[in-house]
Image (tube, coloured by chain):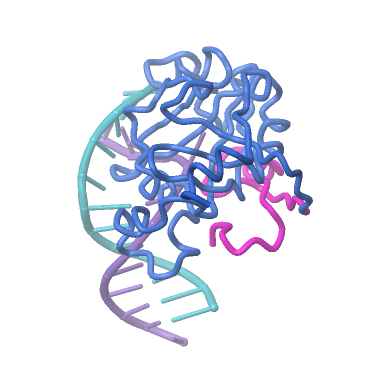
Chain colours: A blue, B cyan, C purple
Amino acid sequence: MANCHDDLLARSHMLTREFYARHATRVARACLGKILVHGHTAGRIVEVEAYLGIDDAAAHASAGITNRTKIIFGDPGHAYVYFIYGMYECLNFVAKDAGCVLIRALEPVCGIPLMRRRRPAAKRIEDLASGPGKLTLAMGITRKLNGIDLTGDRMHVRALNAKERFKIAVSPRIGISKCADWPLRFFIADNRFVSR
DNA sequence: AGGTAGATCTCCT
DNA sequence: GGAGATCTACCTT
């Protein structure tokens, strides 16, 4: 194997627009096990949440079209990156009907030394990207990427050619107060890179 | 092991 | 003006 990225490119393919142009819940579940690639880092998606658009009071889209949320109302397959709590940024994929998929945790795949430099507080590899604010730091994802096309080469998601099997677990979403009982958090069962 | 406070910015009321 | 799709350090049990 020449290096991590060449190996990854050789055994996977980029997801296309059709992947994202579905209901957010479908996209969320389908994202598990896929590989997010940005710069010299890559990570396997192990935990996500679905946000369902204007009728989901916990979703930013429920505020309607504002300067912040306008990207959600655009074409599927774009990145929605927003700033939260004065310190952190969170990455979403835009799905159909103003739906969103929040990426909550990654299993580091490529560029792990670089991730460690960006996340000096993480002592264990499990802590490098096991949270929405952690993974954006580890992968160098900022609001500068808000609105970019995920079918381009700045940042994208890949599916492994070799299908793998795993069990998907479901729970309510984390850190929200409205619609707090909706079962829209999906994660790979028994995976040690899932948040808290 | 578990709870809490502080960091500190952007958006919408 | 206040809440917010969070994380870490620093307490107390």
Q: Is residue A74 left or right of residue A50?
A: left
Residue A35, compared with residue A145, is above or below; it is below
Residue A11, compared with residue A66, is above or below; it is below
The boundaries of the magenta stretch are: A167-196
Q: Is residue A163 left or right of residue A142?
A: right
Name which residue lies at 54% across and 23% down. Answer: A62
State which quadrant residue A177 falls in.
top right
Residue A107 screen position, x and y as percent: 54, 54
All told, the count of numbered labels is: 0
Frontmost residue, B8 versus A3: A3
Q: Is residue A168 left or right of residue A16?
A: right
Name which residue lies at 56% across and 59% down. Answer: A193
Name which residue lies at 29% across and 57% down. Answer: A117
Residue A2, compared with residue A56, is above or below; it is below
Q: Is residue A143 left or right of residue A191?
A: left
Residue A162 screen position, x and y as percent: 73, 44
Frontmost residue, A170 versus A180: A170
State which quadrant residue A103 falls in.
top right
Residue A56 screen position, x and y as percent: 62, 28
Frontmost residue, A49 versus A54: A49
Frontmost residue, A38 versus B3: A38
Q: Is residue A56 magenta-colored?
A: no
Residue farthest along the front direction in this orientation: A2
Where's the C terminus of chain A, which quadrant?
A: bottom right
Name which residue lies at 66% across and 48% down. Answer: A172
Residue A43 screen position, x and y as percent: 52, 47
Report the predominant secondary structure element of the magenta stretch: loop
